[in-house]
Image (spheres, rainbow, N blue to C red):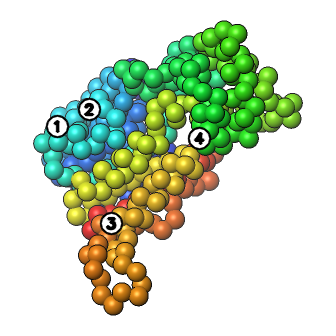
Amino acid sequence: MSEPSYTHKPVLLEECIQALAIRPDGIYLDGTLGRAGHSREIARRLTSGRLICVDRDQAALDAAEERLAPWRDKVELVHSNFCELDAILDGLKLDRVDGMLFDLGVSSPQLDDPSRGFSYMADAPLDMRMDKTDTLTARTVVNEWPQEELRRILWQYGEERYASAIAGAIVRARDKGEIATTLQLVDVLRSAMPAAALREKQHPAKRTFQAIRIAVNDELTAVDKMVRAAVPRLNAGGRLAVISFHSLEDRIVKNALAEFAKGCTCPPDFPVCVCGKKPQVKLVNRKPIVSGPAELEENPRARSAKLRVAEKL
């Protein structure tokens, strides 16, 4: 792979590096390696430190061999889901680390590779698995899940206004024959939506494809498990930085961190604390960090990115 492929600039890069407050001898974990943009910047700041790079997608790990080649002696590549954080660290015989970063955006190479079935712009088998060893595919969701469950995920994960109509159209279409490809599904979606919705700037399939992708990869459960596992595995002063692109993900991160940052939970009228609960983190920023005008001009995809940072007490 040639050098131009490194021009990819990850979202909120400077802000993430600042948030992690990297020590050259520290141990860090990038739980969403992707194109290794964040990992390169962390690795280049280490001297005797270590960086653990995790991804569900073996293709990302294979590409990282070259992208992280100059720092390969400091880097550990792990094929796993970030929600298996305890197992990952236990496997490396690490009790705690000094910082963790999670970028919850879908990796661009996955979207750009039509054969993976994430895109509504190219015809491909309905797949959408971030980890190709997983068994559940978009094809199963679309062709086998009950109508009510389809409606629920479209509404909840995709915030799709026409969830009921689309779920009904999918069930009617699959009764006549399997919906096997991405563009077959796009045709079904178009048939279910009013003309006004089809004229909107946003592609009519965007929200539905997002919802199915989240369901296939069980993304929201994974995020909740990850945050709850990450905080106890940080050293004192260690930082957790999470970038989300979806309001549901951001809410999960925000609520979990708020819980960890809260101390005593005794009723206000108790004269003394009996619960003994102490805050485990302090929130570095009350409000999420978002991209500035320069980054938005360069990368419109950064518009929905929100970075939340917590420091272990």
Identify the element where label 1 is drawn: helix
The reply, left or right, for residue 16 in relation to residue 87 is right
What residue do we see at 40% from left, 80% from top? 267
Q: Which residue occupies the foreground of this view, 293 or 131? A: 131
Tell me how far mark 2 sits from mark 4, CA to CA.
Answer: 28 Å
Tell me how far mark 1 sits from mark 2, CA to CA.
Answer: 10 Å
Task: Say if 276 sits above or below 109 in the image.
Answer: below
Residue annotated with mark 4? 157
User: Of the residues under marks 2 and 4, which one precedes in the sequence?
Assistant: 2
Q: Determine whether label 3 and label 1 are within 8 Å by CB.
A: no
Residue annotated with mark 1? 91
Identify the element where label 3 is drawn: strand
Q: Which amino acid type corresponds to the residue marked 3 in the rendered image? A: Val
Horizontal and vertical percent for residue 131?
39, 25
What residue do we see at 29% from left, 72% from top? 277
What residue do we see at 28% from left, 43% from top? 85
Residue annotated with mark 2? 78
User: Of the residues under marks 1 and 2, which one precedes in the sequence?
Assistant: 2
Would you say residue 101 is visible in this rendering? no
Q: Residues within 10 Å of mark 2 (few under 14, many from 20)?
A: some
Q: Which amino acid type corresponds to the residue marked 1 in the rendered image? A: Gly
Tag in front: 1 or 2: 1
Residue annotated with mark 3? 281
Task: Say if 137 sits above or below 200 in the image.
Answer: above
Q: Which residue occupies the foreground of this view, 221 or 39? A: 221
Horizontal and vertical percent for residue 64?
33, 28
Task: Tell me the quadrant of the picture where the C terminus can be found.
Answer: bottom left
Identify the element where label 4 is drawn: helix
Tell me how far mark 4 sits from mark 1, CA to CA.
Answer: 33 Å
Horizontal and vertical percent for residue 141?
55, 24
User: Of the residues under marks 4 and 1, which one precedes in the sequence?
Assistant: 1
